[in-house]
Amino acid sequence: MAEYARDESKKIDISRDFADKKIGKCPFCKTEEPKWLYKEEWKLIGSNDSYFKCPHCESELKLITDDVTGLAYSPVSPSGKKKKAAGKIQNEPYVTIIKIGLSVKTPQNMLWAGEEMPLAQLKAWTETK
């Protein structure tokens, strides 16, 4: 799998722009503009995955790439059909917490490791902390 990186040389970068605008503040270390690092994992079958890593606390999040690009928001796309069949909110990106950085591990946020939830729910939960 590729290493995490951030390409500032491109005017438009869907993954970078998604991280900066949609994820925004790190939910764990609370860095306002962490300049998320990212990488993609390509699969032969199924949805590709996009991974985002906070360079400050090293916490990692995963989303299906179609949620990052918006393709999963369409109920006629394969990933949109899968999302609808699972009873998920169609136009909401879903995030899985892959890793919580050592510097921000607490008993409370460790309960969220491995969980998948709408991004809005993760953001709302972290605003209450």
Image (cartoon, rainbow, N blue to C red):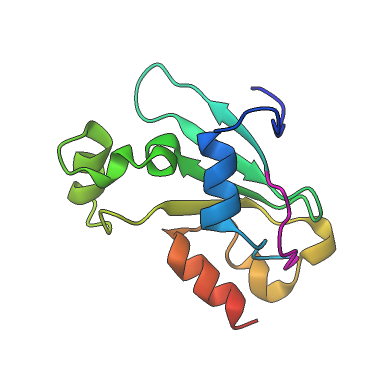
Q: Is residue 114 visible?
A: no
Q: How many marks?
A: 0
Question: Which residue reaches farthest front?
Answer: 11
Counting from the top left corner in percent of width and height, residue 47 is at: 37, 30
Counting from the top left corner in percent of width and height, residue 42 is at: 49, 22
The question of residue 34 being in magenta is answered with: yes
Q: Residue at x 40, y 38 (%)?
A: 69
Give the magenta range. 29-36
Of residues 64 and 71, the one nearer the viewer is 71
Counting from the top left corner in percent of width and height, residue 80 is at: 24, 42
Q: Is residue 41 visible?
A: yes
Quarter of the picture holding the C terminus: bottom right
Quarter of the picture holding the N terminus: top right
Q: Is residue 22 left or right of residue 128?
A: left
Residue 64 picture quarter: top left
Q: Is residue 80 above or below residue 127?
A: above
Residue 76 picture quarter: top left
